[in-house]
Every structure is written in C-alpha cells, then in structure tokens.
Image (spheres, helix red, strand yellow):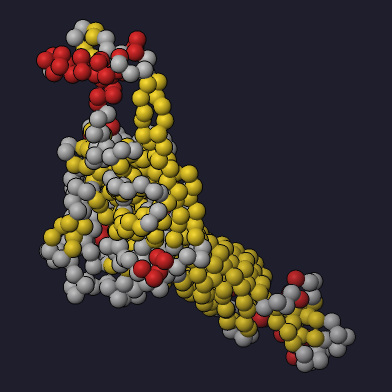
Amino acid sequence: MKDIIKIVLPFFAVLLFTAQSSVAQEMSVESFTKLERDMSARTANIRDINGELCALLKIETTEKGFIFQGMVERTEQKVGEIYVFVSPGMRFITIKHNDFGMLRNYEFPQTIESGVVYHMKLLTTAKEVKIDTASIGKVVDNKLDELLAKKLSEIDLGANVQPVVITMQQIGDKGKTTNGHEYVNLGLSVKWAACNMGEKTAEKLGSYYAWGETSPKRNYSKENNTTYGKPIDVDVTGVKPKYDMARKKWKEPWRLPTSKEVQELIDSCSWQWASLNGMTGYKVTGPNGNSIFIPTSGIYSGNEVVGGGKMGAYWTANHKENDTLGASYLYIASNGYMLKDTARYYGMNIRPVLGNYNRCNFVTLNYANAFIPSQSSYGISIGAVKKYIGYYATVMTNFNFAGFGNNEQITDNVIKEGFYTGKTQTSRFSANAGVLLGKPRYYLKVGAGYGFRTLLWQKDDNTWGEIMSNTYKGIELNAGAMVLLGRFVVSADVVLPINHIGDYLETRIGLGFKF
C-alpha cells in the first residue's frame, strides 16, 4: 500500500499544482411533468414482467450514452430525447453517464401510473471547480491527505448499488415471541415477524407459497394453482383463514399482512439497502427505532427461483376488487420497494404479522316476531368483535309508543263485561346489550336489558286500557348466535321477560355488514 501511495501521490500532486482550476461535469433534473394528452405509452404497448402496461419517461437531453437503472423495461434513443419505459409504481431512478457522473436515486415528485407519459428535462452542465493547491498533496504518517483520499475512494463508486453491512445486533426487539415465533414492534399498527415463514433467522429465505395456498410445492404454475380464477372475498383483516398460510402454519393470532399494513411499512419506516450475513435485502426501521431485515428471496416461477439475491417478493392478504387472477405483494430490489399486483400462481415468501386480528365493527338491521299476541318489531344492532370477544347493543320497536303512557290496567273480568269498542293496538319496545364469546367468525350472544310489550283495547270512552294478561314490563334476557360471512353479518336471538320465563317468547333475526 505504501508503494502505491508513493506512486499515486506525486502523479496527483503534479496535476493539482499545475492547474489552479478544473472543470467538473454534473447533471440534474430541471423539471418533471405529466403529459395528460400524450398517448405514446398506450400505443407503444410495452409491458413489464408482471404484464402491466409501462409508463413512458420522455427525457429531454441533447447528450447520449446514458444508463438508466431501476424498474426499466426498455430505452429508445430519439432525436433530442430518450424514451425510457418503466414499471408503474416506480419511485426512484438512477441515471449514469461516463462524462457527467451519476444522479443516484432521483425520487419522482408524483406517482408513476400505468400507460401515462411524463416529461423530464435533464440538465448536463459543466462548472468550474477551484482547487486550493495549499491544502492537498500532503503526506501525514505515510497516509494521503484526507481530501485526496476521499476523492480516490469515489472513483468508480456506484457501478453497482453497494449494500451497507449490518449485524444481527442491529435488528430485532429483545426476542419477544408468540407461538414460538419472534416478532418486532416497529411502532406501527401491527407487529412484524422477525423472519420469513419456514426459518428462524432474519437473513434466511424461508418457504415459498402461491397466493391462497397453505403448503409449499416444487412447481408453481397457472395449471396447478388452486385459487387462480377463483373469487375469494377479503375483508379488513385479509383473506379467509383457509387461504391464509400464516394462520395455517404459525397458528392464530399470526396472519398475512394486509396491503394497507404493507403500505404503512413503506410509508412510515426508513429503508436501507443492506447485507446481513452475506444476504442482501432491506433493513427496515420503524418510528420507534426498532428494525427488521427483509431479504431478497427472489420469486418462484415454474420449478426454479429467479432473481434471488437481487429482488424479493412477499404476498399480502389482499387482491384488487373483483380480481380473480391476481393478488398484491411487496416488491423489493436495490432500486426501490413498492406494492404491486401479479398472478397468484407465483411462489413468494411470507412475512407474517400480529395485531388487529379479526377486529371489526358491525351493524345489523333486525326483524322480530312475538306470539300471544302476534306482534312484529324492527330495530338495529351495533357492536364490535376482536378475536375471541366482543359486544353488542340492540334497540327494537314497532314504532307505537302508547305503552309508555299511564294506561288503565284491565283485568280479565272487566274484559268479559265487554266495556270496549273492539279496536286494539300493540306497543313494543326493547333495549338490551351483551357480550359476544367464541372464535373468529362464530360467536354466542348473551345479554340483558329493559323492554315492554302491551296489548291495548279501546274503551267506550275512547281511552285505552292495557290487557294485563298479554302485557309485561321489566327486565328481558336474550341469547343467540352471530356468524361473520365475509363482509356480512348474520345473527339470531330469542328474548324472554325475566318475570315471565316461558311466556311471551320473541325471536329475532338480523342481517348486516362489518367494517
């Protein structure tokens, strides 16, 4: 090393001392705009690896010889500009040139949309750089001057995106576990697993699954996929348990992350391209300072893994509305990370989550029918469930509130004497609340409240009297069941007055939705 320094140092010293200034080249983006009426991207019909229509960047420049890195599918040199076709959702692009250096990870100021054209004006300029000849060329303890050493170290830097080497001590959260699997609290709405399914350490790749399938296999194709083309409902906590490989393998409360939770991971955390025990990936650090490592595990296509060490793909629990062919996944590579959609039959890794498991609010519209006298009423129930427990509150009425008044109580003896006009009316009101107990999707209901049911007959003087043999007021008990069916809620109850057990039975049914 000392011999090299002795050779290199005089060479640089001569150059620097014989010139008081030099010219350095650089490039920058002057403007970036969306061309609303330009149909070039659609007419070109260039598609990315996922079959999505590419966006088109029209880069205005008089120079040639640029290299574009990122999710770039094709480049075409035109007169005065360069056409760069990129995948929709792309966030960053790196531009390199032998003479003008590198513009690393330029972040687009707006979302790159499928089939849309954008104009980027790229400036390449030369600026004079003054050199202080008095501050360079010095040797201290046989070492190059720090400034000169820095300049030398930057030569050819960026030919490839270099990951930062990290250690296991820089990730994790003190070994907290559920069902024997470690998780990390990143300060988000859910807690993230510390490693992929099928492994115990963060840098290992783990098992591969097609979307909606709960077992790995040797070949991943459209023909052997069990969910491709099949309509599968998803809700606020994702796909049904029988399609969730995380619930199947790691057991509840582990589950697949939703697209919303993955987007939260993207938007709320800092991402650093890194290497852990020789495996590249991203160190993802949450708002609270804790970190996880997501390796570039590649994607299984057919009977082989492609892109291993360069990109990674992780399934979420969601798909686009009415989409029976694809599903959403987290894409990572050295050039960026984002949510994308692709066909369900590819094999991808799983990074499970904890939290907000099967938690939902619900509302149902109810119909009730009582006997002796026959009487219908209508109402609404609201409530919420979280995992194994929940609550509900119900109000029912037939919208006749005469029973609230102070009516004369009529006994059977008076009725037989016939002092009434023959007109009757019923009044019904009930308000109760209770708890839901069970397991996700299936719950038992137990509750209590206050209610009254009255049969009123009109007397000869046009006043109303309550027929006491068919009237009650007081505490009610209710019991029943509730089932969550995708986005819908179905319930059934029976209601009994506590002071007339066995009499005045009322049955209720409810239909609603969860949110």
Q: Residue at x 36, y 34 (%)?
A: 25
Instruction: Between residue 129 and residue 239, name the one nearer to us.
Output: 129
Seen in the picture, residue 110 relative to 147 is either above or below; the reply is: below
Q: Looking at the image, which residue is at 42% across and 30% down?
A: 127
Residue farthest to the right, as pictured = 461
Q: Is residue 272 left or right of residue 159?
A: right
Question: In screen coordinates, is 39 left or right of 8?
Answer: right
For the point 28% across and 45% down, the residue is 334
Locate residue 11 relative to residue 482 in the image: left or right. left
Is residue 477 positioned above or below 2 on the image? below
Q: Can residue 255 be spotted in the picture?
A: no
Q: Position of residue 365 (x, y in %)?
A: 57, 74
Q: Quadrant of the N terminus?
A: top left
Point out residue 220 in the picture as x, y percentages from the top left corner: 17, 66
> 166 or 463, which lies in front?
166
- Tell me: 476 left or right of 88: right
Q: Is residue 246 among the parts visible in the rendering?
A: yes
Please tell me in which quadrant of the rendered image residue 321 appears. Answer: bottom left
* Residue at far top of view: 141
At 24% from the left edge and 18% from the top edge, which residue is drawn?
Answer: 12
Q: Is residue 303 above or below residue 200?
A: below
Residue 361 rendering spot, x and y as whole percentages: 50, 61
Q: Residue furthest front?
A: 18
Q: To which quarter of the image does residue 367 belong?
A: bottom right
